[in-house]
Image: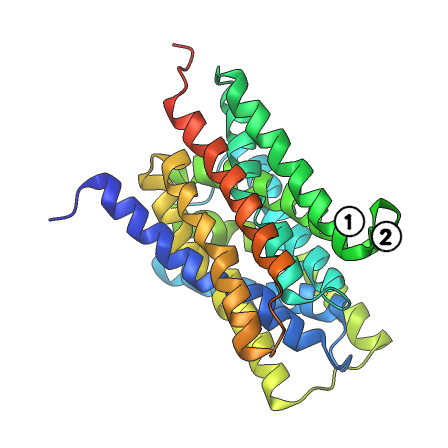
Amino acid sequence: MLSRTHSGLLWGLLGVGAFSFTVPFTRIAVQSGGLSPLFIGSGRAVIASVLAASALAITRQRRPRGVQWTRLAVVAAGVVVGFPLLTSFALTSAPASHGAVVIALLPAATAVTAVLRGREHVSSRFWIMAIVGSVVAVAFAAVQGGGLHGLHRSDLLLFGAVVAAAIGYAEGGLLARELGPWQTVSWALVVSAPVMLALAGVATVQHPPTGTPVEWASFAYLGVVSMFLGFFAWYHGLAIGPMAQVSQVQLVQPVLSICWAGLFLREQITWPTVLGGVAVIACAGLAVRTRLTSPTRP
């Protein structure tokens, strides 16, 4: 019989495993230009929202109430709108392995957001490691771009995606304890559906989508698994908690994403990429672990 903590970690790991394909599959989908980044970022949410609405209707879930709708809008803005769109545009030019290293900041960013959201009192070491991790990630992006002046638009989009996802993860993890894990992401998808449907329509008119079977398969994965089924496991793990401890599982996501980038995209995994990934993951891990051992206000 698994303990509650182990159960949360295993569900979190299952979700992370599903998410680890998101960056390389997004890169595959946008690589040839047949599927525009706006279509991919919005269209995947439309697919997931149809699945979410169906699941909510079939199981007759109760509707959120009052301020829960506002909190769902925050979750939707972060993980349904912000992260998918920003990464889709970023990965039109950035290699998947590069994107995976920058996104490795996400566990630390999620921990920081959870601290601020929960008004927790943490040690100065937590903030130091979170700041160091951010500096390391920026330095990695700058070095690969040829210096600080070489930071690309894609890097800014990736950093924005990290912030958006961190806010969505932290708020979604808290809300999952009230509405249920899969219900939370499903309602967030429903809330964002009108906006994402409109954006998908605009993208289709501006750039009629054409793609290879592999690109369409990647797009389908992003819609069904990355945007829907993966969140079932992830938010279930966060809801079981403890949230900060489960969030540590996300540290393996960039490692897996870099491996998939080498396997599926034949990207050359250079030593700077490996060392940058190790440094960012180490800082994120120390920040999350420091938070776990920090005292909180009663």
Q: Which residue is mark 2?
A: 150
Secondary structure type for disc 2? helix
Tag 1: residue type?
A: Ala
Q: Which residue is at the front of the view, 60 or 295?
A: 295
Question: Quick check: 204 left or right of 268?
Answer: right
Q: Please say if the residues under marks 1 and 2 sit with CB atoms less than 8 Å apart.
A: yes
Structural crowding at the residue carrying mark 1, measured as other residues with C-alpha within 10 Å and reported as few (<14), some (14–19) or many (≥20): some
> Residue at left 25%, top 40%?
5
> Residue at left 58%, top 52%?
275
Single out the residue that lies furthest toward the top.
298
> Considering the image in quadrants, where does the C terminus appear?
top left
Mark nearer the N terminus (1 vs 2): 1
Q: Position of residue 248 (x, y in %)?
A: 42, 42
> Residue at left 70%, top 64%?
88
Secondary structure type for disc 1? helix
Q: Position of residue 128 (x, y in %)?
A: 58, 24
Q: Is residue 94 above or below residue 179?
A: below
Q: Which residue is mark 1?
A: 142
Q: Is residue 205 above or below residue 89?
A: below
Question: Quick check: 56 left or right of 218?
Answer: left
Q: Position of residue 4 (x, y in %)?
A: 22, 40
